[in-house]
Amino acid sequence: MKAIQRITRLCTGPKIIGLSLILILTASCMQQPKAKTAREILGNPQYPAIAFGGYRNADRSDAPTVAQLKEDVSILHAMGIRILRTYHARLYDHAPNLLKAIAEIKTEDPNFEMYVMLGAWMQCEGAWTDSPNHNQGDQEENSAEIAKAVELAQKYPDIVKVIAVGNESMVHWAASYYVHPRIILKEVDYLQALKADGKLDSSLWITSSDNFASWGGEGPEYHLPALDSLIEAVDYLSVHVYPFHDTHYNPDWWWTRPEEEGLEKAAKIDASMQRGLARAQNQVAAVKAYLKDKALVKPIHIGETGWASADNHLYGQDASGAADEYKQAWFYHKMRAYCSAEQMACFYFEAFDEPWKDGDNPGGSENHFGLFTVDGVAKMPIWSLVDQGIFEGLSRGAKPIRKSLDGDSAKALMLAGIPTKQSDQAALRISDSSAEALVIGPKDLHSDFKIEQLITLNPWEGSCAARLADDGSLIIQTGTGDWWGASLDLKEPWDMRAWEDGELILEISGDSDCRFQMGFQSGLFADGSQKAAILNLGPGTKFKIDEEPRRIRIPLRMIKAEANLDDVRAPLYIKGIYGFDGKEIRIHRFAYRS
């Protein structure tokens, strides 16, 4: 009777007339709130979103239990999150168990709200092999993913509000598995037909979640009729923007500019981060411009964006200097504010660190995008929530939620990396006194040289290491995996036709016994126009290297092959052939002379 009295007071106040009225109001009050639709929650500031994976181990096959997922969902709900994004419909039962966990919590607490953007993984025929066929989908795997997504959406219509067909499945740098847009379109059309037939809830939204470039925001290689048809078919565009990764791959905006070198550390970081935020905003604007140009009208929401809190390679203190909690907090709050102002949902990547993402390298950035560590430590972006006491009584893996770095903001700034100087970058130079191009060395080397372009040191996908020594030489630490390669990349193409009848001058040394290719590349991998001019060096060739520098002169016509001299994008590239040993190759001079 006390329970009934408590419920009736909550529903109507103290005056209740008649037992039948009490029972009616009791039943009404115990009903769950009406589930919202995707249209109502996406972009609604009352329904913050986040990307979620509950894997806690270096091996993803050790999937989280329903009990562990309930633990995670309760933590995220406490911090105000109301929409979770997943990536696979079937893999290790992660998604089915997550939905079960949410459903069980809803049964225990009728007022509990949590919705899901359910991912269905898409890949090409021959994905993860040496011969992927990007024009055909993996019919067996893709069909099974869609079938499972449909099953789960039908079973949990009050929770599943979006199905995302594929994750970064159209962007060309996903070279192991990406597909042509028509493959995604086929599955989207199928799901929309199920909605039309009443087999899926009519308010369920269908999308694909992909890089901004894949949605028309960059490069004509993506501007395909099938993409336009896909945009018309989806209910909204789920767009990914990652300035964090661009601090390495496209860092010209990131470098500390000469006029900023005298600023305090926090101001230097703020200047680069402001440019990073603008970069993300401009990428969204580029997608909007493409839609406008095609006279297409669809909502846009951020399907992924994020910033890693640590890295031991491309983004660490000795590289781009991007990965730390100070910058993660800066980016998190600024992106949330931007998306709220634009009425866009932001599926921030991600809720918890997932060690499986780079299982062989615990210090790798992919393992450190979470707002929480694996054992429930809250990172700097959400320290204020810990201070508010919203996590009281909650834990992850029996460990209570507590702040990282002892909650010390000064310590976080002290540990933060400083964006590398623009003045320290390698540059392409054309001599004013001779017909020679020198392509390595810091900017202040050889003052009589005219600087044409800054160059990005690009160890391909982190397969090796590349750095400039103080004397201007380039040091490559060869990879030890299945392959490795690196290049000096230009933002704009360089016309080398003036050197067509000239020669390559190379001065090289090292302790590596690796056989490798060296030369230059024209064109772009993304649009299939990339071609290489190569020279084989190392064991088994006439160009062996040892600890003493060796001068090599090669007529350019011997190595230019099919490369287009008027469209050189990497004036130097190096790629391992065999004998990968992790040792050094040192390039003291690399020049073209007419």
Image: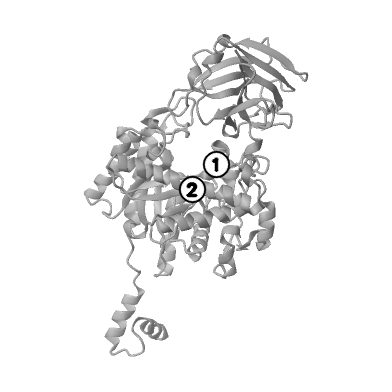
Q: Nearer the viewer, residue 296 or 197?
A: 296
Q: Amino acid at mark 1?
A: Trp
Circle 1 residue: 253
Going 60% across and 14% down the picture, which residue do you hit? 535
Residue 88 seen from this side: no
In front of the other: 566 or 530? 566
Give the labeled residue for mark 2. Answer: 278
Q: Position of residue 411 (x, y in %)?
A: 69, 57
Residue 381 shown left or right of residue 162 in the figure: right
Residue 77 at x, y percent in the picture:
48, 63
User: In the picture, residue 24 is in which quadrant?
Assistant: bottom left
**Which residue lies at the image location 59% right of the left edge and 18% below the top edge?**
519
Asked whether, in this view, residue 396 is left or right of residue 564, the answer is right
Residue at 71% across / 14% down in the picture? 551
- What secondary structure is found at the residue carrying circle 2? helix
Q: Nearer the viewer, residue 395 or 167?
A: 167
Query: Circle 1 — which element?
Result: helix
Q: Position of residue 195 (x, y in %)?
A: 25, 49
Decide: few, some or many residues near mark 1? Use Cα within 10 Å; few <14, some 14-19, many ≥20.
some
Point 60% across, 12% down: residue: 594
In the rendered structure, which amino acid carries the disc numbered 2? Ala
